Amino acid sequence: MKQWYEELFENYGMKYDRESFTQGTAGECDFIEKEIGYNKKTKILDIGCGTGRHSIGLARRGYTVVGIDLSESLLQRAREKASGQNLPIVFQKQDARNLPFSQEFDLAIMLCEGAFPLMETDEMNFQILQNAANALKPNGKLIFTTLNGLFPLFHSVKEFLDSQTKEGNATYHNNTFDLMTFREHSTTCVEDDLGNKKELECNERYYVPCEITWLLKTLNFKTIDIFGAKLGAFSRSDKLSTEDYEMLVIAT
């Protein structure tokens, strides 16, 4: 049986690129470049690359990028966009829980919930972090965003998502947040690129900073920095607060 995140992204490449949360790509790529010291020799793995927006943004700036995703339809859109710009990006269908890479990359990125907090168990989410770590060379860097567990303790997730949604975007209903598991359950309604309407029962894991720190320490990351993640404007000067829906994690 397919999981909700597999169904959601079937035939969703065009619509996905119009979602409000995908509009900060250029600024996010600026931040990534700064973090790697503008070193064009940096080999980058984009985990949960979706329609390839960060892969394409970075390849255009001269970096070597491999993008992986579970969704063939999002990868198809990524390949179309990349070939339209003559960019030699390798896009592969891979499951982030089971990656074949070992010490091949200088940087791994997982942005906008690229795979990480979407899995149905904490063990699977941990496998994704483990595989990202395995893919990195010694002294490699991991940059990812994930849902901030401090946010739902102070705010309604539904109100926040509704405030961000534009016409034609996915909508969210019946949101409940479980304090024992830090999982939010909701019904997501989307219309795909072919006009099919879908109603999906979703389940996403929110993490608190000390959990993320502990998980990364067990994977031998030496420095772990956590900040607030502002769409299109990532910054090390953004102290994480209860107002941030997502957090930005940088680990070396």
Image: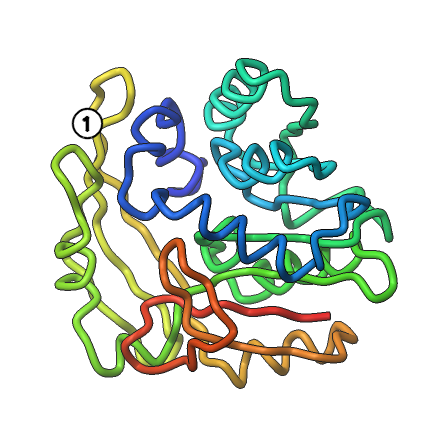
> For this view, does 170 lie left or right of residue 125?
left
> For this view, does 64 lie left or right of residue 51?
right
Q: Quadrant of residue 123?
A: bottom right
> For this view, does 14 lie left or right of residue 137?
left
Between 49 and 44, the one nearer to me in the picture: 44
Q: Can you say which quadrant of the picture contains the C terminus?
A: bottom right
Q: How many marks?
A: 1
Give the percent coordinates (x, y) of residue 109. Answer: 61, 52
Q: Can you say which quadrant of the picture contains the N terminus?
A: top left
Q: Residue at x 37, y 42 (%)?
A: 4
Give the percent coordinates (x, y) of residue 240. Answer: 41, 80
Q: Is residue 238 depicted above or below 187 in this figure? A: below
User: Dot 1: within a 10 Å radius of its alpha carbon, few (fewer than 14), some, or many (20 or more) residues?
Assistant: few
Q: Residue at x 35, y 82 (%)?
A: 241
Q: Residue at x 38, y 66 (%)?
A: 246
Q: Is residue 214 depicted above or below 45 in this figure? A: below
Between 162 and 230, the one nearer to me in the picture: 230
Give the percent coordinates (x, y) of residue 230. Answer: 37, 63
Q: Quadrant of residue 99?
A: top right
Q: Amino acid at mark 1?
A: Lys
> For this view, does 226 lie left or right of residue 196?
right
Q: Where does label 1 land, which residue?
A: 197
Give the percent coordinates (x, y) of residue 96. Answer: 63, 47
Q: Residue furthest bottom?
A: 210
Q: Residue at x 63, y 30 (%)?
A: 93
Q: Is residue 91 depicted above or below 107 in this figure? A: above
Q: How is the image coloured?
A: rainbow
Element under disc 1: strand
